[in-house]
Amino acid sequence: MPVPPGTRLGDGTDAAGKHERESGPDHGTAHGTADHSPPGEYTDMEVKIGTTRIVLQQGDLAQQRADALVNAANSSLEPGGGVCGALHAAAGPALAEACATHRATHGQCAVGDAVATVAGDLQAQHVIHAVGPVWHDGQRGENILLERVWQRTLARAREIEARTIAFPAISTGVYGFPAEPAALIALNAIVRDIQTHAGSFDEVRIVLFDEDSLRVWTTALEEVQRTMTG
Ligand code: AR6
């Protein structure tokens, strides 16, 4: 799923202003190093497309501030483990209550779809519950479903007029989706959304829990960037 060639990436803007960044005229990205900053307090990579920043950052999603935080949810919208558990713990009971109400009125959320609720005590207005696919063997539509869940979640974010959105690496924990293809699928979906709906978002942030994930996503974003600047 290539990104259209000839797209200008980045303008060298250091929006977060937390780290020095290298930036070339067409590659507005750079890397901080994790050595000097605690997790969650530095931006490891940032790419700007038009007015929208794509930011990769190491940290705990439940501690993030954004208009919308995305939950890696299950179809029942039941509180679970992983990032879902962390979000529910930080949100307090209002989030589980909102999920129960949604379940009672709308039933299950399909795999590949996403629904928005209130965010309880989280530092956000909304939580968007994104139901990614469980990885089996890669032959059961997993890639398409993962792409769809990113598309649907971004569409939901637009509907609720979120300007800043913070995501986890959907499906790559309990659901077992391999990290590298998951990152590429997600980043291509994000870039296409930003290009199609220019100006919708100020920031699309991916919050990676550990350094390995951050490295995988950084490599993937560099690859997507290469495709774009071709
Ligand atoms: N902040 C950021 N990322 C996190 C955090 C955190 N606090 N905790 C884990 N991750 P997962 P899934 C990373 O399992 O694979 C739940 O029970 C984690 O390292 O949270 O989509 C739900 O209720 C991994 O890279 O989500 C569902 O039943 C990524 O977040 C099911 O798990 C996603 O891991 C969903 O599974």
Image (tube, rainbow, N blue to C red):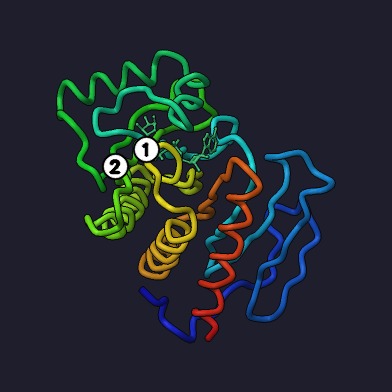
Quadrant occupied by the N terminus: bottom left
Q: Which mark is residue 114?
A: 2
The reply to whether dot 1 and dot 2 touch (C-beta < 8 Å) is: yes
Mark 1, ligand 1, within 8 Å: the answer is no
- Residue 175 place in picture, x, y as percent: 37, 41
Observer able to see residue 155 = yes
The residue at the point 51 percent across, 44 percent down is 166
- Identified by mark 1, the residue type is Ile
Quick check: 91 left or right of 138? right
Disc 1 to disc 2, C-alpha distance: 6 Å
The residue at the point 20 percent across, 41 percent down is 110
In the rendered view, tell whether residue 75 sits above or below residue 29: above
- Identified by mark 2, the residue type is Ala
Sequence-wise first label, 1 or 2: 2
Quick check: 58 left or right of 78? right
> Label 1 belongs to which residue?
128
Mark 2, ligand 1, within 8 Å: the answer is no
The residue at the point 30 percent across, 54 percent down is 137
Quarter assignment of residue 200: bottom left
The residue at the point 30 percent across, 33 percent down is 74
Quick check: 76 left or right of 198? left
